[in-house]
Image (cartoon, grey):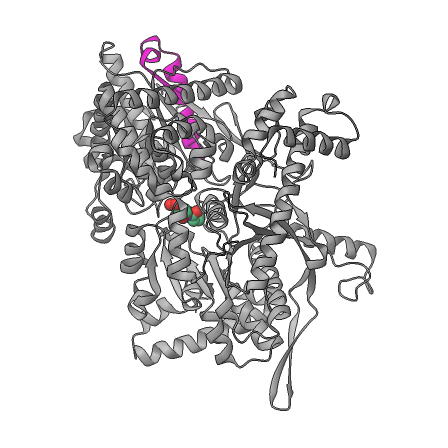
């Protein structure tokens, strides 16, 4: 490793030379980035080989985390930090007249996810490696990541993200580890000596080629693997594939159909869509991942009879749940096990995390589609369901409704969440309230059947990326005050509490915040040409755009503030900059209109000299991990205002807290735990409780129009959506308006508006008291260690996977 500057510089110059065949002074920043990343990669590759050897020799239990999404973001700086080369590298490059950040900015971002679920998977990868836990990721190497968002005339436009076009330094293609995944065809059954054999014939074979990315732990020599699969045609010289009897056109059609499997990431988080290609992606990942795990396991152990003792398979939501029947297929068809033995192994190997309670998100596949694409898997799911329903009949004779609700196959569909619960030994939600809602409503029947399966694992975020990497100045300040132990043990941040009352420390924290706000202001100037005031309150709502996340509630409050300012230009408020960012699913009409509304209100404010004195609204284009890393450290206020009971956890809330923002938030998801951890005096809560929301759903009684009629300020802003006053077409926001009044405001924006406006006034008051505000910031930072994903992963390791750290 290169902890000394001289050592680093020598190695870097050599690497540059050998890679590019020229001197560093002749190279572009991209060339320089490649040389640096290549150098770090070499160091990590050595540790990687060693880690794998240790795992193999010690024959430890390993966990495989299956996720259809990973939102890794850039990794060069993380890798430098984790391998303890950052300082030497920064200094060495400095001597060569090179600024490290100019190189890290060259790295294309791995945006293989759309939001919280994908980012959680990446935080978990980081924590597993940093806790020395033998845990690996399994996913898809999409050729196109999350779409790039452009704002054109206030509307979202989507552009492709060809992130691999200039190559990816961090991946290792492993053609020798490729496996075949089979789609379509039919099953021929045969009895041989009383044993039933299943032959899959006439299928379309797809070659799954793994690309491995190293995941380096923090200062601990551990390097785990994120294995991403790419779909390719079978080699021309195999007897599989449509080569022998096909013409050129057929071969090319085969190629296109195969390559489409790992072509794109689906960006839709608004409603479940039953696209066959998506099911293909899911089976492709599950089957390829499992085959490679099984292959290695058999090589080491010769048999799969004790598979569950050495392997844990975790599924991140239901997307990889075909893993359950796939493991059954391998154990029965390929290993010759009995159904009961195979089922015992499978259900002792798989665990499942649920990430949403929104009914429209639950995956279900038409049984015919399922059968045609995966004929053998269909047979197995069918049998799992037969046996399961039989068990249910015995336990609940005559309770047809209950059995239908719990059945895996019902109404012509395969219900994936039901398959996940039945096929796994552990089911967890991602925040306390979310797990409670699963138990008492969404998965109630399953909880009644097997209560011990259910458990909570509150989400977390890696403090290495979201504090150490994103906010280096604050990190140094923290270390000066309490030492460095928090970097390895995030809960040590609690020691900061004793500094909260120290005005000198508080002043320094405030200065760092100001510097971060200036950095964000510069970014906005550079990318949008807009000027924002770093001395205003930075009030941030950055996340996917969704009705339940209620960006419109935020906008209604801004419009109300504007009305009050117009009425009284002397209104005594601290100037505020409302910062929004986030992508809308391309087919989600209301979410796209919400973006247009935000931009329209921004335009309205800019055009009015009275308003622009005190407020400013900006929508930052193309929200992604690297942009979050600039916004989060600059935030004063964190908007977490989802309808109570709807946000499973949220993780943005944790990132902001960790960087000293004060949350204005509903009683939802992890907000509830954040508030109780940091203390109610350091959190501004408002709005309906989850029980009140669920009561409205159950019993009715909500009347949006009555709420609107009763509050003149609210009535005014809602009317303004369609009055023609906004600088947009008169009908532009008619849909949003109708959603609130004609369709009775599904997410209770109107109901929560009054309380939200009061909470916003409270924010303004608190901010005016500088000393008080600074204390609140420090308390938030101090308590954020509880939400490090290290804690979460530790709980998964002990409570679900039963894997132990491997220290060497
Ligand atoms: C979400 C939704 C919600 C509305 C209805 C349709 C639909 C379809 C897909 C999705 C996204 C899949 C689930 C997901 O990303 N959940 C997020 O997971 C995060 C990590 O656990 C958690 O913090 C977020 O609260 C949760 O929304």
Residue 658 versus residue 354: which sits nearer the camera? Answer: 658
254 is higher (above) or lower (below) than 141: below
Q: In the displayed image of the protein, which residue is found farthest to the bottom?
A: 193
Q: Position of residue 737 (x, y in %)?
A: 33, 32
- Image: magenta residue range: 592-617
Taking the spot 63% from the left edge, 52% from the top edge, the residue there is 49
Q: As rendered, which of 794 and 230 lies closer to the eye?
A: 794
Q: Is residue 87 above or below residue 362?
A: above
Asked whether residue 728 appears in the rendered view, the answer is no
Task: Decide whether the magenta segment is chiefly helix, strand or loop.
Answer: helix
562 or 724: which is nearer to us? 562
Q: Where's residue 474, x and y in %?
A: 40, 27
> Hey, which residue is sitting farthest left in the picture?
710
Count of numbered tags: 0
Vertical placement of residue 642 versus 383, above or below: above
Q: Nearer the viewer, residue 617 or 173?
A: 173
The question of residue 384 being in magenta is answered with no
Horizontal side, residue 480 vs residue 326: left or right: left
**Quadrant placement of the N terminus:** top right
Please state the horizontal and vertical placement of residue 571, each as a whole percent of the image.
22, 13
Measured as percent of width and height from the top left, residue 248 is found at: 82, 55
The image shows residue 530, relative to residue 197, as above or below, that is above
Residue 598 belongs to the span the image colors magenta: yes
Look at 32% across and 69% down and name the residue there: 450
């Amino acid at each position: 490793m290169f902890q000394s500057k001289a050592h680093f510089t020598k190695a870097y110059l050599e690497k540059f030379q050998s890679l590019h065949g020229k001197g560093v002074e002749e190279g572009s920043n991209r060339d320089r980035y490649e040389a640096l990343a290549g150098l770090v990669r070499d160091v990590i590759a050595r540790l990687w080989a060693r880690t794998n050897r240790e795992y193999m020799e010690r024959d430890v239990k390993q966990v495989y985390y299956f996720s259809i999404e990973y939102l890794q973001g850039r990794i060069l700086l993380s890798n430098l930090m984790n391998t303890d080369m950052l300082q030497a590298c920064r200094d060495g490059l400095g001597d060569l007249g090179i600024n490290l950040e100019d190189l890290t900015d060259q790295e294309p971002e791995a945006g293989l996810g759309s939001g919280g679920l994908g980012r959680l998977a990446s935080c978990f990868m980081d924590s597993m490696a940093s806790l020395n836990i033998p845990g690996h990721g399994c996913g898809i190497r999409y050729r196109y990541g999350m779409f790039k968002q452009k704002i054109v005339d206030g509307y979202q436009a989507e552009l492709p993200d060809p992130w691999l076009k200039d190559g990816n330094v961090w991946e290792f293609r492993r053609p020798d580890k490729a496996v075949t995944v089979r789609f379509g065809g039919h099953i021929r059954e045969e009895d041989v000596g009383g044993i039933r054999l299943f032959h899959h014939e006439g299928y379309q074979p797809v070659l799954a080629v793994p690309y491995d990315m190293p995941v380096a732990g923090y200062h601990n020599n551990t390097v785990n693997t994120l294995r991403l699969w790419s779909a390719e045609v079978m080699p021309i010289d195999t007897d599989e594939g449509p080569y022998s009897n096909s013409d050129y056109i057929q071969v090319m059609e085969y190629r296109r159909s195969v390559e489409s499997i790992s072509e794109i990431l689906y960006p839709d988080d608004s409603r479940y869509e039953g696209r066959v290609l998506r099911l293909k992606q899911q089976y492709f990942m599950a089957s390829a991942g499992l085959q490679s795990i099984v292959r290695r396991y058999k090589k080491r152990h010769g048999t799969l009879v004790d598979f569950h003792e050495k392997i844990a398979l975790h599924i991140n939501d239901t997307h990889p749940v075909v893993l359950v029947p796939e493991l059954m297929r391998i154990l029965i068809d390929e290993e010759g096990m009995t159904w009961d033995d195979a089922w015992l192994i499978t259900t002792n190997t798989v665990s499942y995390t649920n990430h949403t309670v929104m009914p429209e998100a639950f995956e279900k596949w038409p049984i015919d589609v399922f059968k045609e694409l995966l004929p053998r898997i269909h047979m197995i799911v069918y049998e799992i369901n037969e046996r399961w329903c039989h068990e249910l009949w015995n336990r609940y004779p005559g309770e047809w409704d209950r059995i239908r609700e719990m059945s895996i196959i019902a109404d012509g569909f395969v219900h994936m969440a039901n398959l996940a619960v039945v096929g796994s030994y552990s089911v967890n939600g991602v925040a306390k309230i979310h797990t409670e809602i699963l138990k008492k409503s969404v998965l109630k029947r399953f909880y009644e059947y097997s209560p011990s399966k259910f458990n909570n694992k509150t989400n977390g975020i890696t403090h290495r990326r979201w504090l150490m990497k994103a906010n280096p100045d604050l990190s140094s300040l923290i270390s000066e005050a309490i030492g460095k132990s928090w970097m390895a043990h995030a809960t040590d941040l609690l020691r900061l509490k004793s500094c909260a009352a120290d005005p000198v420390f508080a002043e320094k924290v405030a200065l760092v915040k100001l510097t971060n706000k200036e950095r964000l202001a510069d970014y906005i100037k550079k990318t949008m040409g807009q000027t924002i005031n770093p001395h205003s309150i930075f009030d941030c709502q950055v996340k996917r755009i969704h009705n339940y996340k209620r960006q419109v509630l935020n906008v209604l409050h801004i419009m109300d503030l504007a009305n009050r300012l117009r009425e009284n230009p002397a209104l005594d408020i601290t100037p505020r900059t409302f910062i929004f960012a986030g992508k809308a699913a391309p087919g989600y009409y209301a979410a796209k209109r919400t973006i247009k509304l935000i931009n329209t209100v921004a335009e309205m404010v800019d055009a009015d000299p009275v308003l622009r004195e005190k407020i400013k609204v900006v929508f930052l284009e193309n929200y992604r991990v690297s942009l979050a890393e600039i916004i989060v450290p600059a935030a004063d206020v964190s908007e977490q205002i989802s309808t109570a009971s709807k946000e499973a956890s949220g993780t943005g809330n944790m990132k902001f807290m960790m960087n000293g923002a004060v949350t204005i938030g509903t009683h939802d998801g992890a907000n509830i735990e954040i508030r109780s951890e940091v203390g109610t005096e350091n959190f501004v809560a408002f709005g309906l409780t989850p029980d009140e929301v669920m009561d409205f759903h159950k019993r009715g009684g909500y009347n949006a129009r009555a709420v609107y009629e009763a509050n003149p300020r609210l009535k005014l802003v809602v009317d303004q959506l369609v009055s023609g006053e906004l600088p947009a077409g008169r009908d532009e926001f008619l849909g949003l308006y109708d959603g609130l009044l004609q369709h009775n405001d599904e997410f209770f924006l109107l109901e929560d508006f009054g309380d939200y406006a009061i909470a916003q006034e409270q924010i303004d008051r608190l901010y005016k008291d500088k000393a008080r505000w600074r204390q609140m910031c420090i308390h938030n930072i101090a308590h954020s260690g509880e939400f490090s994903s290290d804690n979460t992963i530790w709980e998964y390791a002990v409570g679900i996977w039963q894997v132990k750290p491997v220290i060497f």
